[in-house]
Image (cartoon, rainbow, N blue to C red):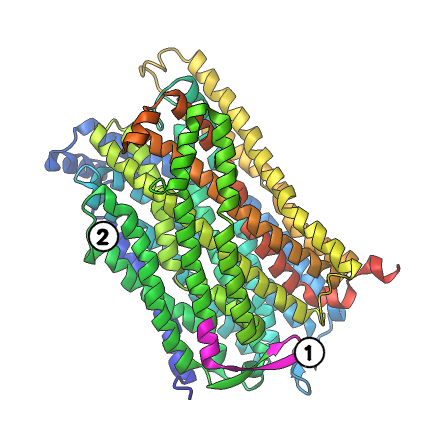
Amino acid sequence: MVALSEGLIQVLIPAAALLGIGFAFLQWVLVSRVKVSGYADDESQENNLIESGHEEGFEDFEVVAKCAEIQKAISVGATSFLFTQYKYLVVFMGAFGAIIFLFLGSVKSFSTKSEPCTYNKGQMCKPALANAIFSTIAFFLGALTSVLSGFLGMKIATYANARTSLEARKGIGKAFTIAFRSGAVMGFLLAANGLLVLYASINLFKLYYGDDWEGLYESITGYGLGGSSMALFGRVGGGIYTKAADVGADLVGKIEKNIPEDDPRNPAVIADNVGDNVGDIAGMGSDLFGSYAESTCAALFVASISSFGFTHNYAAMSYPLLISSMGIVICLITTLFATDLVEVKNVSEIEPSLKRQLLISTVLMTAGAALVSFVALPSKFTLYDFGNDKVVKNWHLFFCVVTGLWAGLVIGYTTEYYTSNAYSPVQDVADSCRTGAATNVIFGLALGYKSVIVPIFSIALSIYVSFRLAAMYGIAMAALGMLSTIATGLAIDAYGPISDNAGGIAEMAGMSHEVRERTDSLDAAGNTTAAIGKGFAIGSAALVSLALFGAFVSRAGIKTVNVMNPKVFIGLIVGAMLPYWFSAMTMKSVGSAALKMVEEVRRQFNSIPGLMEGRTKPDYANCVKISTDASLREMIPPGALVLVTPLIAGTFFGVETLAGLLAGSLVSGVQVAISASNTGGAWDNAKKYIEAGASEHAKALGPKGSEAHKAAVIGDTVGDPLKDTSGPSLNILIKLMAVEALVFAPFFAAHGGLIFKHI
């Protein structure tokens, strides 16, 4: 029995999105109560900042003023990089939008006549030209929302970093709350904006499409393509930027000059802190937005060619959007546990508090998904299953959502086990540093490979259960289930780079050792949460990609993907190679950019008199310029590889080879991405474990500057491009190729396979 009317749904979805935006604004207001301004141009604000420092009786005038100055430098650097990057992306958007229009418009020679529907036999659908126009508009909308998500996240992070440093003077609990609230601002803004823009787009497109739901939801898939294509450049460009600076700063500063991390004498220190915001914040925001947009688009498309679409059942059709709406409400309640209901009082409570967020949101969302499933869906209906109709019950879809949701939790906890220095895997890696960097690298690689096992079994189980229950729609809903708590996932993910920046600012501003210890403990927990966020992104990408793959196979009219067919197999083996080619490009880009950075940092130490003694300031701007130029130049070849490959495969070799290509890249990309991210995360936390010296074992390996510590720094430096550039970018590779294949499927089905047609 369906209890939701169309009118009620039209109110509930935007209401949930606006609630998310309102809650984000409230968190921002609470963060802004800490009196710091990143923009010291305003004299009254600067006076306000300095007075508050004296009023609290904590720090002197210079330290607090310095915080404002550093925050401004980081914010200006991040903003100018993103604006420069967006200039390139505007050109790309225009060119790729034109390709979408030309390819899809040419399917029926730009005809403006209505034609019979592909799936809903006996009905007339809007012309192919309309699909070309609206898919292009949806692409632009997705791209703009993705860019906005990343930019807002970066703005919030650079607004919060110095505030977290200043709050750390009062205690660990206050600093944690500020960092977490700031992460929540980003999480809720992204989840709510993604839902609101998609909902508005569907309603606007409906003004033209009317009852042609097949055409409407096919054109909406462009929204996912726009989101992911921007995410690719954001992730790759931001990743190259941040790691070039990080590697350069670490190799010269820590290993050669033996100065602390984030020491203001290090010329690359501002570029390193800017990088945290453009890579880990803006890049991750765009990435998870892309996953959310694509899984929703895949679910909507499959539903539109099933009984939901044919009978125009609006409540059932809106099921993916209602699940996301419920997710925003659930995440709002969950956030209160971290910020208001349970206070963090000491260092040992930070990680459990963040882990609790995952568990609470998963448990509450299970109940929320049950409610939505039983009020929005009919008790029995049919779903499209590769040419057949599969009879499905509403509780089947509830289980699909829940398997994805709980698989996400398992992936999150497994990632935490392999990357947190509270457990034996990272401690073993740290211990291996006793015998030098080589054993550290061997142990780290082994850990990364081993960490793939449990997530892959979780994803496999989730795929099997959801496909058996509800075919490809079930897999799309499992992906959406994993992403339903995206606001909480992003909050704990964004918390990491904010804490990292806060530690850097505390060091550069010359705050006390006690404050630096607090920010270090926030940062160590943040490293683990960042790894958990990457695990979620990769796990959801696998499910999203498979759902898109199913939608592509359906739209391209392929009955079965037969591995014994040589056309399919060559696609499969080439697809499996692509993640390695892509990783080679991104790793080499970081390496060559880091080389320039190392040379520049060495040059400054050697040629600027008094720099090591702290009497003169380094030239920070030159290092920022090196990172910016390298990332903008180097992000183009990997991006082109991902975007051009499906177009070449579909146009010249046909839909079967393209299906093989997508399957190969999915299977191989997930493994490489998980192992790369976890290896890098483990090396980073092994280094932090030695630096913190919290246990007898860690003290025996330390202190900073010992041979074991130097070996750990080398491992961390090798792992940096793995965990922050190649690994996280791979999940975009597998999703983006699949959504691109789906958007261009009508063209490939009609005109593709130019070579194989003549052989």
Callout 2 crowding tier (Cα within 10 Å): few <14, some 14–19, many ≥20: few
**Which element type, helix, strand or loop, lies under badge 1?**
loop
Residue 201 vertical position relative to residue 254 in the rendered view, above or below: below
Q: Which residue is mark 2?
A: 30
Describe the element under mark 2 as helix, strand or loop.
helix
Residue drawn where x is 78% and y is 59% of the image: 567
Residue 727 pos. (x, y %): 52, 44
Q: Is residue 296 left or right of residue 757?
A: left
From where the camera sits, is residue 83 visible? no
Q: State the image quarter where residue 208 is shown.
A: bottom right
Q: Which residue is mark 1?
A: 118
In x, y percent, where is residue 131?
64, 70
Question: At 40% across and 32% down in the image, what residue appears?
Answer: 430
Picture quadrant of residue 384: bottom right
Of badges 2 and 1, nearer the viewer stands 1
Q: Is residue 387 magenta?
A: yes
Magenta-span inclusion, residue 87:
no
Q: Position of residue 546 (x, y in %)?
A: 58, 62
Q: How many marks?
A: 2
Pinpoint residue 495: horizontal percent, then vertical percent.
34, 47
User: Over which residues does the magenta segment extend?
Assistant: 384-399
Q: Residue at x 42, y 57 (%)?
A: 410
Question: What's the mark number on residue 415?
Answer: none
Amino acid found under the numbered disc labelled 1? Thr
